[in-house]
Image (tube, coloured by chain):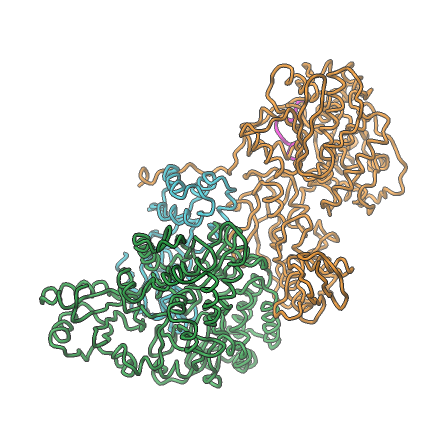
Amino acid sequence: MAMVTIDGRRVEVDAGTTILDAAKKLGVDIPTLCYHPDLAVQAVCRICVVEIEGQKLLQPACAFPVQDGMVIYTNTPRVRQARKMNLELLLSHHPQDCLQCVRNRNCELQALAERFGMREIRFEHKLRGLPEDHSTPAIVREPDKCILCRRCVSVCQDVQAAGVLFPSQRGAETVVTPVFGRGLDEVACALCGQCIHACPVGAITERDDTERVWQALADPNKHVVVQTAPATRVSIGEEMGLPPGRIITGKLVAALRRLGFDKVMDTDFTADLTIIEEGNELLKRLKEGGVLPMITSCSPGWVKFGEHFYPDLLKHISTCKSPQQMFGALVKTYYARKAGIDPKDIFSVSLMPCTAKKYEADRPEMCDSGYKDVDVVLTSRELGRMLREAGINLGDLPEEEHDDPMGISTGAAAIFGATGGVMEAALRTVYEVATGSELPKIDFEQVRGLDGIKEATVRVGDLDVRVAVAHGLGNAKKILDLMREGKANYHFVEVMCCPGGCVGGGGQPIPTNMEIRGIRGSALYEADRGLPLRKSHENPAITQIYAEFLGEPLGEVSHHLLHTHYTPREKYPAVKKAVCSEAAG
Amino acid sequence: MEPAARNAGICPAKIGEILQKYSRRKDALVAILHDVQKEAGYLSEEALTEIASGLDVPVSRVYGVATFYTLFATKPKGEHIIRVCQDAPCHVLGAKAVIEALEKELGIPMGGTTSDGKFTLEYTSCLGVCGVAPAMMINEAVYGNLTPERIPLILKEYK
Amino acid sequence: MEFYRSHVLVCGGTPCVLEGCKGVRDALIAEVKRRGLDREVKVVETGCLGPCDLGPVIVVYPEGTLYQKVHVPDVPEIVEEHLLKGRVVTRLVGEGLQAGVVKYEEPTYLGVQERIVLRNCGVIDPESIEEYIARDGYRALAKCLTEMKPEEVIDAVKKSGLVGRGGAAFPTGLKWNFTARADADQKYILCNADEGEPGTFKDRLILEGDPHSILEGMAVAGYAVGADKGFIYVRGEYGLSIERLGKAIEQAKALGLLGPDIFGSGFSFDVEIRKGAGAYVCGEETALIESIEGNRGEPRIKPPYPGTEGLFGKPTVVNNVETIVNVPPILLNGPDWFRRFGTERCPGTKVFTLTGDINNKGLIEVPMGITLRRVIYEIGGGIPGGRGFKMAQTGGTSGGCLPKELLDVPMDYFTLPEHGSALGSGALLIMDDTHCIVDIAECFMRFFEHESCGKCTPCREGTARMRGIVGKIARGEGKPEDLDLLDELGSAMQVSSLCGLGQAAPVPIKTMLRYFRDEFESHINDRLCPTGTCGT
């Protein structure tokens, strides 16, 4: 233990605690910028510097460990002057058009400028004029806004193991960019959007598609249908000022109706459908000696990552489309027929916690209905923007129900949005379908929670089914590398691209951090407990769609509409073929 | 003639040899980049990609390292690279006039490459030969006690 | 060993190489042979002899006559006159050096210079391990391995009062102690030879002139702290250094002075060379470690310090070349002997490199605490053309600029900081009164802007901003409030930058503002450059 004095008050903390954490214990809020509680400490912005008695240099509170007897001052003139100078330096290179920025009022740099009362910037205001990156349907980069805090580098390298964003050049020329300054479309980027959560400013954002949705809503000839992803019902409240983890499914439905959507249906319905298809696929692979372990396919960020980095393992990925794309394929076939609407008049919107879903919807193979199955993907943040613009306050709205025929769902679908949820939902169904008897205990606690990799063995009939769950691509990589070495002795693996699962998706409200991911996840399990139906195969709407339209799981219609294939992709961006110097010389 | 004629490329096999020499150790990256550049003239996108692939590291990291150090070039350069020091000890003894003479003689500004691809002129940090300041390096050779008058004579050796 | 009547040492330092010393050496060998003197006279290529601006330089022993600017056509005359007839060729003995260097080891010269670090530079053939051994080489290592416990070695270094010569002046013995006490399966010794401080070339001359002394010092350090592996990180521009060091390592290995079980003591030590690639910041110890690990040379956050968590996460001693070279003589002669040189707080000698407006440019080794005045006017031969002294920058570009009022300040690691400057690496840049303060300031900041690694805000943005503001003042576009802004920015950089680069970058400007503020003001207020340099 170490007894330290901060601004004249004493506190006892574990030796090695950072000054920042020790100060927090005393309620002293030291300003930070490059610090992020979930990421490697950078200590590069030098905003959190404090004075330690007996030291000439100021030290960064986020990184410097306390020692017993240390006397620390957090607001001396030297400290304040250094902080304000560093802030002034950053601001002098940062665009000043905060009003036009998507992060306006939710920007850490802006908040600091306000906190420090920055009224004047004495340095000549200079932007670097770096090119913007609009190359993907998912993520937009505006490097001129970048303050080089490197949080995105840390999440991209350490957490997601993608290695897309990295500093290049040096000194004042330093830029954080994909390799060779290419666009994100040319590199092995999963488009997970975790860098957006890491970014303290507006240098990395989602592509904003709200205008296309507004247009469709205003078009009398369009029948606009929206689907709501599992994880959005516990996060969208944050966009409207509610605390994280509030389950507001009914209010969300009401809000979407008020925005003008003709039908508000539920991705949870196709989540249940996914379980039926994927569960049967697993049973088939088990029975017929198919490729094992089978890996879940709901997470498009993971799928793209797999295509780039593990093209040799693609046959392990379930051929099931993600719930979003199953919904998209059905809304312009099954629903269109049932509702008597020409599918060309249907405009299919999905509300997703995810940036990679924007990419997924744009994949050329996602047109099995004969049209683009999902026309526009909105992230939670974009919907928040639309609701605020329309003046729709969630808190004031009544609870409403999703529309038929794709609006009924079970608790198994709700937990799709949390890590381990797909696995648990699948186990509930696979057990009962395979054994024909009822599960003794419906909750699979071993696959819940925020541990990076979770493992369990479940007795199904006379087979011990070994499963693993990984969330965050860095954790997924560990399992995939084991698979490559032939050391992964699993039958079924769930991989979610984003830490915490979809509740922590790249399209979720900002801030999203580990604590908030946990809260949102718990809310989904709470929603599951509160639902009358908690197993996908008990969903009557599912029974109905097989009876009326699909026939049987893995049947011909399913095969055509609900299953897909994967494309091996390059790990490295395309470069022109190397030529031997001897040959050329 | 293309300015980058001698930088036509490098065999993946040659890069493989270099990587093997360092037992594909990730920590040898700086040495590997030195060797590949020596072989190929500069570090092309394809060479960097080949190195990344051989070491099994993200190519962004290899590029990040290659662009950090001034002795590495990720773009083709002239046949002869002139690195002139303009740090204080050289500056005090007239580096400015020497640089002007170089720019005039070559017809290019600092950072430029002559249109025939012969010379690239760039700034270097102190070469550690301040006893004979002002100084410059042409390829591996150091020249000291420079005066504007000596520049045409020195360049003649390379033309 | 054969006996030779005379030895002719040909300086093989980089500046002499580029002035053509190799040709001179070959011509001497041929001429000596032609004259049939090859059994009496030995021609040896050696490390730097010091007066770098006078190359090629040769010294003839036993007389110790130094000839400067020797070219191939001069060779027959030297052989004929000096080696055959014993007459000094006066026309090749430099004017500027009358007092000091005519006789290389003449007492008047040694009266000021003390050679501990440079004990072998210019005396032995750096490519001959035999010559190094003949000058007590590897005896310190033998003594440590056979007579001393590691603790005793550390104790001796502690008692000697040796502090790091790279600039930070951290007590070497203490540093070793941290690593010795650390519990780890692997430890490392790193020799920092990434000499990049403008105006500094001492490490290069040691690398070129006495590479074995570095290897021996590293091995001693390895024994003291329990490390069996060493790396020397040499900047990429130092081709000759790398070549000679590589040869030295091979020779030492061949004789069993490096490698397994040295002197049958059970102690093993290996050394590997790592080549830099052009980044001044890699002279910072943690940036250097990053570079060796194959990364961008960006400094790490400290703590943890390298002593406990350094290269590959293992306890690592990082010492500058000059520091390491001090080690063998300290162990051989004892700490008390070392304390006879220099000052109480800073024992030993310091190698300085004299550059700029000074008659005798080059390398000198003098006791700590010598005044600037003695260095400039006694050893350096004063300022060319009899011009007036304006300022001297001590410690390289990251050191402060001192005006003539401070010529009598003793130069050591503790006194100079009291005047806002630093001893740093020992670079001394002398500037006469024709130079403009603002113009020089811009030159300094251009360097830091170019060399900042870009990791932390104050250094990345601050160096660029400082350069911009100083440039504006030089162009006559400065505003009165710019000077306070520079000062304020400098202070913030000094206290809040991540590493020594950013912390030191404002030092020259801050001292210039302190001692030469009026010259900035005349650029701003009167749009006038007093020396006519800036064309305002």
* Most foreground residue, A181 or A67: A67
Q: Residue at x 37, y 64 (%)?
A: C140
Residue at the outermost front position: C147
Quadrant assignment for the N terminus of chain C = bottom left
Where C61 falls versus A188 (above or below)? below
Q: Is residue C216 visible?
A: yes
Quarter holding residue A45: bottom right
Chain letter for orange? A
Residue in the image at 53% along x and 46% along y: A181
Whether A291 is drawn above or below B107: the answer is above
Chain identity for the colour cyan used in the image: B
- Above or below, A473 relative to C275: above
Up/down of A460 relative to C409, above or below? above
User: What residue do we see at 79% from left, 38% from top?
Assistant: A522
Q: Position of residue C373 (x, y in %)?
A: 41, 84
Q: Position of residue C453 (x, y in %)?
A: 52, 58
For residue C347, which quarter of the picture?
A: bottom left
Identity of the residue drawn at 44% across and 50% down: B30
Quarter location, residue A187? top right
Q: Position of residue A112 (x, y in %)?
A: 71, 60
Q: Nearer the viewer, residue C206 or B102?
A: C206
**Is A360 contained in the magenta span?**
yes
Chain coloured green: which letter? C
Report the side of A269 relative to C92 (left or right).
right
Magenta residues span A359-368
Q: Is residue C358 magenta?
A: no
